[in-house]
Image (cartoon, rainbow, N blue to C red):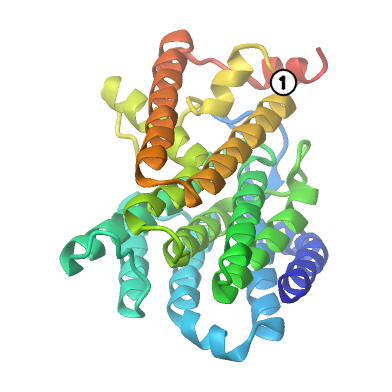
Amino acid sequence: MNYLLIFISALLLAMGGTPLARRLALRLDVLDLPNERKIHSQPIPRLGGVAIYTAFMLALVLLGNRFYISQVVGIFLGATLVSLLGAWDDRRGLPAYLKLVGQILAALILIGSGVEVGFLHHPVLNALVTVIWVVGITNALNFLDNMDGLAGGVATIASTFFVLMAGLSGQYLVGSLAAAVMGASLGFLLYNFNPATIFMGDSGALFLGFVLAAVGIKLRFPDNVDFVTWMVPVAVLALPIFDMALVVLSRLRRGKNPLTTPGKDHVSHRLVALGYTRREAVLMLYLACGAGGVLAMAITEASVVMGYILGSIAFVGGLVALVWLEWRVPGGQLRITRETAQSSETK
């Protein structure tokens, strides 16, 4: 019941707050302007992250258990930091290295508050992997925010699986965080699904990525060993990880800086290049994200041998898909124009 209340409150707050964020973006001239590397043809407000952040925080503060909320101060502080950095980038632009430094600092705040991975059983290694995981997932969600409804929908699906697993294992804190993400993301998605009237911007994408990374760290499975269950959050967030791996490897192969080189070389763009509409591409990726969640649920109950068999099959399948996509639709040859994207919507 508490999960449901937090979800509904975050959903309603995001539904009511997103139009206000859109008006604020128009007033402040925080717009995503069309250019040669973007598909949309009209300026789109991009302060949706403000509505997501506000809905998430208010839902937890108003309805979350005070005892548990006091334990997530580190998550709140880190999430606020990356969201502010994203908002600044949306408004005035921010060098990539400064955003990276801020994300590392946010990850260190998490570690300082006691939120870190523990399956390596060595403090230095655990801290190092925590920073890599948090910074990686934070940027992976930001990378995935490249098509109407994609990042918001994936965040909704991933947080739904986190809620289910937290509920089954009796972890109220993790479930509350995930329920707030689910409600805030879904409420925003109502305005962001194709054709979008507002974008979440870096403030929303970085925020969602950071919170999902933290939730993945907090999730525990006392009935299984961490030698297996470390794969659970990786499976839930496999799609953004896959997309970032595809983009980074493709750009490195072409001699480009993967962090500062924009391009239409994401998995969603490649699906559109293969002939799917943007809606079809996003819905296919929703299904892929859901498949990762189902795999994660299976791993929670798997033995060591079965868990690694499932993980290995998924890894090999992802590797084959990555190679095939890069070979079939090379990132350096993608030419998705606004005209072809719009015509594919009406085919």
- Residue at the spot of label 1: 277
Q: Quadrant of the C terminus?
A: top right
Left or right of 305, for residue 90: right
- Characterize the local packing of mark 1: few (<14), some (14-19) or many (20 or more) Cα atoms within 10 angstroms: many
Q: Quadrant of the N terminus?
A: bottom right
Q: Is residue 236 above or below residue 208?
A: above
Residue visible at 39% across and 30% down in the picture: 315
Identify residue type, mark 1. Answer: Thr
Which of the pair 46/179 is nearer the observer?
Answer: 179
- Splitting the image into 4 quarters, where does residue 287 fall? top right
Residue 165: percent from the left, percent from the top? 58, 59
* Residue 47 visible in the picture: no
Residue visible at 56% across and 75% down in the picture: 173
Which of the pair 169/141 is nearer the observer?
Answer: 169
Residue visible at 34% across and 35% down in the picture: 258
Residue 244: percent from the left, percent from the top? 42, 37
Q: Is residue 146 above or below residue 152?
A: above
Judged from this view, the residue extending furthest toward the bottom is 67
* Residue 301 visible in the picture: yes
Which of the pair 271/33 is nearer the observer?
Answer: 271
Residue 182: percent from the left, percent from the top? 68, 59
- Splitting the image into 4 quarters, where does residue 13 fall? bottom right
- Splitting the image into 4 quarters, where does residue 103 fall? bottom left
Q: How many marks?
A: 1
Judged from this view, the residue extending furthest toward the top is 328
Left or right of 334, for residue 53: right
Q: Circle 1 — which element?
A: loop
